[in-house]
Amino acid sequence: MKYWQKIAMSLAMVAGLAGLMPAHAADEPRHTQMDAVRELRAEDAVCTRCHDQSEKNPVLSIYQTRHGVKADARTPTCQSCHGPSESHIKKPANMAERPPVDFLSKRAKATSKDIESCVGCHKSGARSHWSGSAHESRDVLCTSCHQMHTHQDKVRDRATQPEVCFACHKEQRAQYSRPSRHLTKDGKMACADCHNPHGSAGPTLMKRDSVNATCYTCHMEKRGPFLRSHQPAQEDCTICHNPHGTTTPNLLKARPPFLCQQCHEPATHQGRNGTLIQNSASGTTNNTAGRGCLNCHTNTHGTNNPVNINNERTSRR
């Protein structure tokens, strides 16, 4: 018997054994799951009989989001977040006198305690550092940034995310209006590309463990390793750059040579008026030529030039 004939016989035997199994055995897990889904959706029906698109803030759009996937048993119900309330459901005839739901029964507006309904599910991954983070310690609510009952959450859209952040971070909003800036307002970058608003192990809610590690995700050519490194560039990019925007090219906090002279003391030519040495008719040197340090020191982040043996800090090509 040929090899392919043996395979055909084996498949036929497996198919025959499968036909002997009860028809409901394979379908039982699926039916059980669907029954659980139907029970969960029945809880929503108690709420949506009143809360529909005629509300001031329509709520049925939540079924266009991940929170409203009806076929998934993991999907929360209305009562999963808002809590059950018998007095709220058994409302009086006058709708204006309808008691509030439990989670807002004693407060005029939501507080940080109401975040527990979100953190109960969203507590891993990028939200593992939420406890003790800058936003958590300042009582910033999930609903301050997110919109749950809409299919278009502005903070999750790269094009509209900055306007949500700028509602509080007004200084950064002004900086992004300057000539030299990242392309955040153009929709090519988002605040969440560098920051993790739910908390992080790095400074200023950086996505990585340090400022430089976050910058290197895009500016990989500045990472090195270099034969001769520029110490401030390897320590913290924000010593020289303001990532949110400046009036100086390349996001520099000040233009050279004034930026460089903040660290390089006037012991040699870097502290004098002239930044490009020229020979004049009188034989003097060090005339002011309106130039900058970067005309000679082009590789300010570090260099692999093997020629600079006697002067290891020139950072030249």
Image (cartoon, rainbow, N blue to C red):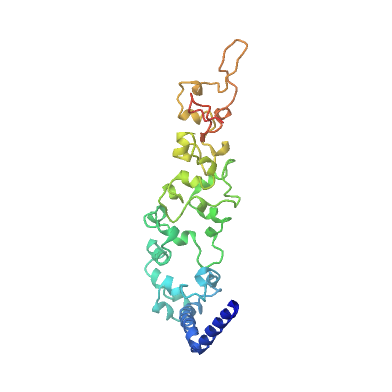
Is 21 above or below relative to 56?
below
Task: Write the residue at 37% across / 68% down.
Answer: 106
Q: Quadrant of residue 180?
A: top right
Where does the image place residue 72, in percent across and percent down from the top left? Answer: 49, 74
Task: Write the residue at 44% across / 76% down.
Answer: 98
- Quadrant of the snapshot with the N terminus: bottom right
**Nearer to me, 5 or 257:** 5
Task: Write the residue at 54% across / 62% down.
Answer: 153
Does the image show residue 4? yes
Q: Residue furthest right?
A: 281
Q: Residue furthest front?
A: 1
How many numbered dots are placed on residues in this image?
Answer: 0
Q: Residue furthest top?
A: 282
**Nearer to me, 80 or 21:** 21
**Nearer to me, 58 or 8:** 8
Where does the image place residue 268, in percent across and percent down from the top left? Answer: 48, 21
Is 259 above or below relative to 33?
above
